[in-house]
Image (cartoon, rainbow, N blue to C red):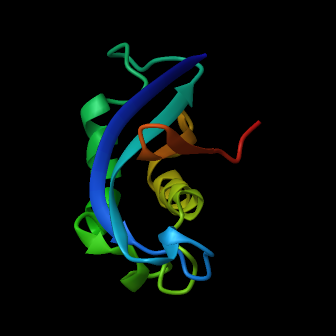
Amino acid sequence: MYEIMIETGFSASHQVRGYPGDCAQPHGHNWKVQVYVRADRTNSLGMVIDFRRLKEITCELTGQLDHKSLNNLPPFDKENPTSENIAKWLYDNLKRKIDTEDYYLWAVEVFETETSRVYYTERE
């Protein structure tokens, strides 16, 4: 089994509606995103998926969030833009673009800070 990972990030503001504390106020983070892809074998070039291509696909999505107020963007205009919801949104959107017969999205990890992160996967 091969597992590859790329890392990228974005900067954005958010506020957690209904939160009983400071996070209810608008504030920002420099989010870090890690995307994990797995495969049983490599292709004829000896790769699972080209790191560059995986990063391009991921950056298409994180670019929609970069330098934005997340609370103003669907679906976060209706659900709180927590790290958990951001990780699931990225996973759902990446899965549609990445999963093939040869490799599949394993997980998305979103770091709100260096010490606070969410790891999301739908696979066991």
Q: Residue furthest top?
A: 46
Q: Quadrant of residue 43?
A: top left
Image vertical order of residue 77 relative to residue 46, above or below? below
Q: Nearer the viewer, residue 83 or 121?
A: 83
Is 63 placed left or right of 76 in the picture?
A: left
Q: Point out residue 2 in the picture as x, y percentages from the top left corner.
A: 54, 18
* Residue drawn at point x = 77 percent, y = 36 percent: 124
Q: Point out residue 25 in the picture as x, y percentages from the top left corner.
A: 43, 77
Q: Point out residue 52 in the picture as x, y percentages from the top left corner.
A: 24, 34
Image vertical order of residue 33 relative to residue 25, above or below? above
Q: Nearer the viewer, residue 25 or 13?
A: 25
Counting every numbered tag in the picture gives 0
Q: Is residue 100 visible?
A: no
Image vertical order of residue 15 relative to residue 44, above or below? below
Q: Nearer the viewer, residue 117 or 73?
A: 117
Q: Quadrant of residue 73?
A: bottom left
* Residue drawn at point x = 35 percent, y = 69 percent: 27
Q: Quadrant of residue 78?
A: bottom right
Q: Identify the image quadrant of the N terminus.
A: top right
* Residue drawn at point x = 57 percent, y = 71 percent: 21
Q: Is residue 2 visible?
A: yes
Q: Residue furthest front?
A: 21
Image vertical order of residue 113 relative to residue 14, above or below? above
Is 26 placed left or right of 106 in the picture?
A: left
Q: Point out residue 33 in the picture as x, y percentages from the top left corner.
A: 40, 44
* Residue drawn at point x = 27 percent, y = 73 percent: 68
Is 28 placed left or right of 71 in the picture?
A: left
Q: Nearer the viewer, residue 106 or 9?
A: 9
